[in-house]
Amino acid sequence: LVCRITSKIDDSNQDVLLDDWEKSGLKLASVVRVHKMATLEKELVEAQIGKVSETVKLRIKTILGDLTNKN
């Protein structure tokens, strides 16, 4: 399960701002677009370019819970 990460920052309740984007291995300030998810075969992942913090993971889980509870 993957979420889109983008440098196009909008004011959305389903985006998580990556405050530590440089530390995460990204080149630009970015957000995790939680409502834009996809499933992917593990073999299709060619490389890992960075990692998000535990704080960001918790924010993502909170938004996922909110989205799940709405449906």
Image: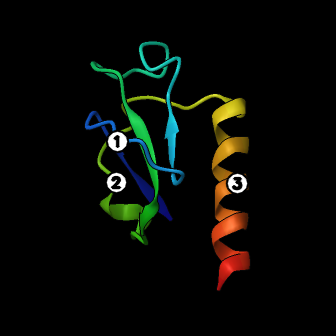
Q: Earlier in the sequence, mark 2 or mark 3?
A: 2
CB atoms of marks 2 and 3 within 8 Å: no
Per the rendering, the mark at residue 45 is 2
Position of the C terminus by quadrant: bottom right
Which is more foreground, mark 2 or mark 3?
Answer: 3
Mark 3 element type:
helix
Which is more foreground, mark 1 or mark 3?
Answer: 1
Which is more foreground, mark 2 or mark 1?
Answer: 1
Q: Position of residue 17 (x, y in %)?
A: 50, 32
CB atoms of marks 2 and 1 within 8 Å: no
Residue at the disc numbered 3: 61
Residue type highlighted by circle 1: Asp
Q: Residue at x 28, y 33 (%)?
A: 7
Residue type highlighted by circle 2: Val
Mark 2 element type:
loop
Q: Residue at x 70, y 66 (%)?
A: 66
Mark 1 element type:
loop
Q: Earlier in the sequence, mark 2 or mark 1?
A: 1
Q: Earlier in the sequence, mark 1 or mark 3?
A: 1
**Real-space CA distance between mark 2 and mark 1, rounded to the nearest whole angstrom:** 27 Å
Residue at the disc numbered 1: 10
Against 28, residue 71 (above or below) is below
**Real-space CA distance between mark 1 and mark 3, rounded to the nearest whole angstrom:** 20 Å
Q: Residue at x 63, y 70 (%)?
A: 67
